[in-house]
Image (spheres, rainbow, N blue to C red):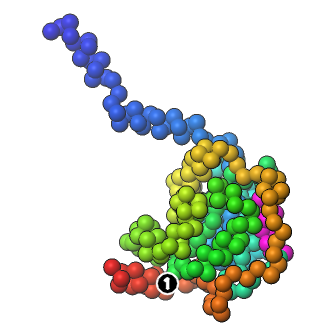
Amino acid sequence: MEANTPLQTEARDAPGPEEKAKKAAAEAKVANQLPEVRLVVLGWRWPGKSLTGNTIIGREEFRLERAAEFCVKRQTEVLGRQVTVVDTPGWFSAQDTPPSYKEELVRGASLCPPGPHVFLLVIPIGMFTEVDRARIEEHVSLFGERVWKHTIVVFTWAEVLRTISIERYIRREGKELQSVLEKCKRRYFVINNCIFGEHPQVERLLERVEKMVAEEGGYYNPEEVEKEKKPLDENQNPAREGRELGARPKQNSVLSLSKTMEVELLSSE
């Protein structure tokens, strides 16, 4: 019996499957961590786009008083990483986006050389229509089709959902929203812009970016895409059909939207 004691002790000390899985995950996390993370933020005017940039940076660097007409670049250190955030002009929801805005939007990718690791496509929680999808595809396609390999959808204003999960919201909004998510391999993240400063959500977002970079094999290269890109069509006008083009909620409309969304989503269950 005594001769077996050391072997039994070694067996008890050997790591189990859960410990091995945790260790592997920790090693992968360290292996994927980038010394620098470069992000470009895209979206409508007033969807919480600039506010999302401020949440990542951890302070108010992007002005919220009015919609920007030019790209704004800010850099700081976040959780041991050098982080660059480029906020781009928001496209219009109720009228065509001027060609100058589109050109400035595309320029954003060149402001963080050699190229952004990720495009954060900011979509506020709310009714998502066919026109919303068309507007997204119109503007994101300016960066070339390969941009979707480097895109993560960031949902803002998720507070209005209250007890409704983001997965249920995505299902309820149907094929229009799901088609956008399919383009970026269903990569999405929910951010709470009411929480400011250092917070675990920012670390989780950066880890999600690093995982995507590891899976897709690098960053978006604007020079490669420039060779393939077609000239901008100044007369582009996606299926408006006389309808309001998906106006986005402002911050002070969150409470009213909350009631509308909750009733609409629950009533059809």
Question: Residue sitting at 46 percent across and 70 percent down?
Answer: 170
Q: Is residue 250 left or right of residue 163?
A: right
Q: Position of residue 31 (x, y in %)?
A: 58, 36
Crowdedness near tag 1: few (<14), some (14–19) or many (≥20) residues, C-alpha within 10 Å: some
- Residue 196 showing in the rendered view: no
Nearer-the-camera pick, 12 or 44: 44
Q: Residue at x 20, y 10 (%)?
A: 4
Quadrant of the drawing holding the N terminus: top left
User: Where is residue 11 shown, x and y percent of the image?
Assistant: 28, 20
Q: Does residue 5 show up?
A: yes
At horizontal 58% and vertical 71% (from top left) the residue drawn is 123
Front residue (pair 11, 58)? 11
Q: Which residue is mark 1?
A: 257
User: Residue at position x 66%, y 76% from top?
Assistant: 135
Please tell me whether residue 51 is drawn above or below residue 84 in the rendered image: below
Reply above or below: 233 against 71: below
As drawn, the residue found furthest toward the bottom would be: 242
Magenta-colored stretch includes residue 19: no
Label 1 SS: helix
Depth check, front residue: 55 or 45: 45
Residue 81 lies in what quarter of the image? top right
Q: Which residues are magenta?
A: 100-109
Q: Quadrant of residue 62?
A: bottom right
Quadrant of the rendered image containing residue 155: bottom right
Assess whether residue 104 is covered by the magenta stretch.
yes
Q: Position of residue 92 (x, y in %)?
A: 71, 81
Q: Which quadrant is home to the C terminus?
A: bottom left
